[in-house]
Image: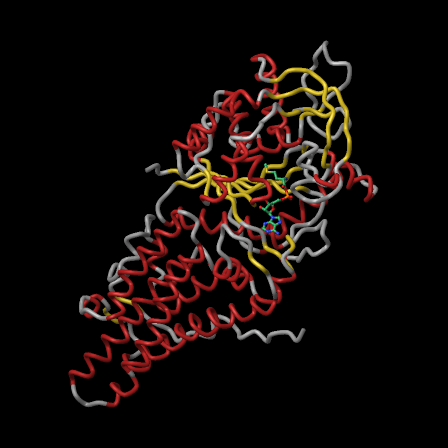
Amino acid sequence: MSSRYYITTPIYYVTDAPHIGHLYTTVAADIMSHYQKMMGKEVWFLTGTDEHGQKIQKKAKETGETPQQLADRVVQRYLEAWKVYGIEYNDFIRTTEERHKKVVQAYIKKLMNSGDIYLSSYEGLYCIPCEAYCTETQATDGKCPDCQRPVENLREESYFFKMSKYVEPLIKHIEQNPSFIIPESRKNEVLGFLKGEVRDISISRTTIDWGIPMPADPKATKSHCVYVWFDALTNYISALGPMDNDEKFRKFWPEAIHVVGKDILRFHAVYWPTFLMALGLPLPKQIVAHGWLTDSNRKISKSLGNAIDPIALSKEVGIDGMRFFLFREFVFGLDGEYTKEIMYQRINADLANDFGNCINRVTNMIPKYMGNDAIEVTKLLSESSELKTLASEVVPQAHKEMEHFGYQKSLESIWKLISGVNKYVENNAPWTLAKSTDPKDKQKLEEVLLHCHESLRIASLFLVPFIPTSAKRAIAYLGTESDLKVAAPLATQLLWGKGPTSVKVTKSAPLFPRLEIPKA
Ligand code: ME8
């Protein structure tokens, strides 16, 4: 297994400010990046914005700005949202940057020279919002098969990319690498598409001028811009600096994992790999396609008018509340219906009640029954207990789920441990043991408390990538900050009895305030 990890989000259109859907993908990548770092990997995490193309040009006309002004204004909204949510990306790429444009142009030139890009003309139905052509049969009632908006008839001189040439090799690659596209259902969808009729695709546009120019060509009668999806997809490589033979490119490109919404799966799982094959470059390691957040079963999106502002939400339910809710409530590969009620209930039940209360209870009892000084933990932890057994079951499960982006199940496993602590406290009633004068009970009391403490130490440490601020606060109350200072990998620290040998516990303030569910 490689010691490196390269994770990307889609680069988002700068037509509008980010909404909860963009947050979903970006936090997903942030959690995974954080988790992999804790597991000892050298991680590179890239996000950014997609700033060229017809969509942006059209929007700028509406707002009375130049496309560049629009991009410069809207990109700030993304940067601000990611700052609020503590997204720790390593690089943020904008497709209007020089470092990006030069790679796109070089790659296009290379493909023109090799004959994989050729000049011809095109007439067809085109969906402007999706920036994609479709066939008559796909466009039932003149509507785009992907977004259901009306398609337009477009005729233009165009450059084409010989996608058809790479269909067979790509099918083979997908079949030989079962985890190239996850989840499985999405892989089958891509294979179904590839096994149908795949034509060469138009790779340039003459109808717009807001894009990267195609290289000069005496055969062309018009000036062409590079198709926005070729431009956009190339960001995953241009950001690594391949033309300057950057070390980053060598180190990270072969490890690439693209996290995307299912809406743009075909571009990532068909277009992008075929471009790369034609360029003679290695394919990404994996494409992870997640489902949509929906509102009344409709995709949440700016253009459908049901977008939800992530910054406003963070003020309502807290940053960690949001980060947790999105990944505990929804199965990553499936669509998830978003409602405020579900969000408030989930945050109250799991964070305020289960986790928050549990931390509060245990950090209250330890100083009360064992004194305020630092306490030795190791000796008593070697005793067996149901919590020790539970931890040895759920932690490996939680890791296993993270291997395939199973955030929900991973959190569910950790919650088994947290609920286990609550039950264990009830069953063993430390307050009764504390009243006893029998030395055996005193020993039992300490054992019970320390086993609770150890379980919460492990749970809190595992939760750092998900809810960084609150998990670190919990860790501070438990007195186990030294876990965070250990050089990664933290996998060992997540094992029973492998934390600090002596801890000083402080009674916690509430970690999560109980939220008042707003009246509808
Ligand atoms: O497609 N639920 O940009 P975009 C979940 N620029 N995720 C959602 C979502 C929802 N309701 N709505 C949006 C583009 N997303 C291109 C990408 S990449 C080389 C170019 C997320 O601004 C999800 O990740 O339309 C989706 O794929 C992406 O935002 C689309 O963002």
Of the pair 237 and 136, the residue shown nearer to us: 136
Of the pair 505 and 424, the residue shown nearer to us: 424
Question: Quarter of the picture for ligand 1?
Answer: top right
Image quarter (top left, top right, bottom left or bottom right) of the N terminus: top left
The quadrant in which residue 222 appears is: top right
Residue 311 seen: no
- Image height check: is 306 above or below 511? above
Image quarter (top left, top right, bottom left or bottom right) of the C terminus: bottom right
- Image height check: is 225 above or below 429? above
Measuring from the top left, give residue 376's x and y in whole percent: 23, 69
Of the pair 517 and 451, the residue shown nearer to us: 517
Measuring from the top left, give residue 67's x and y in whole percent: 76, 37
Residue 455 seen: yes
Looking at the image, residue 218 sits to the left or right of residue 512; the answer is right
Measuring from the top left, give residue 389's x and y in whole percent: 24, 65
The quadrant in which residue 221 appears is: top right
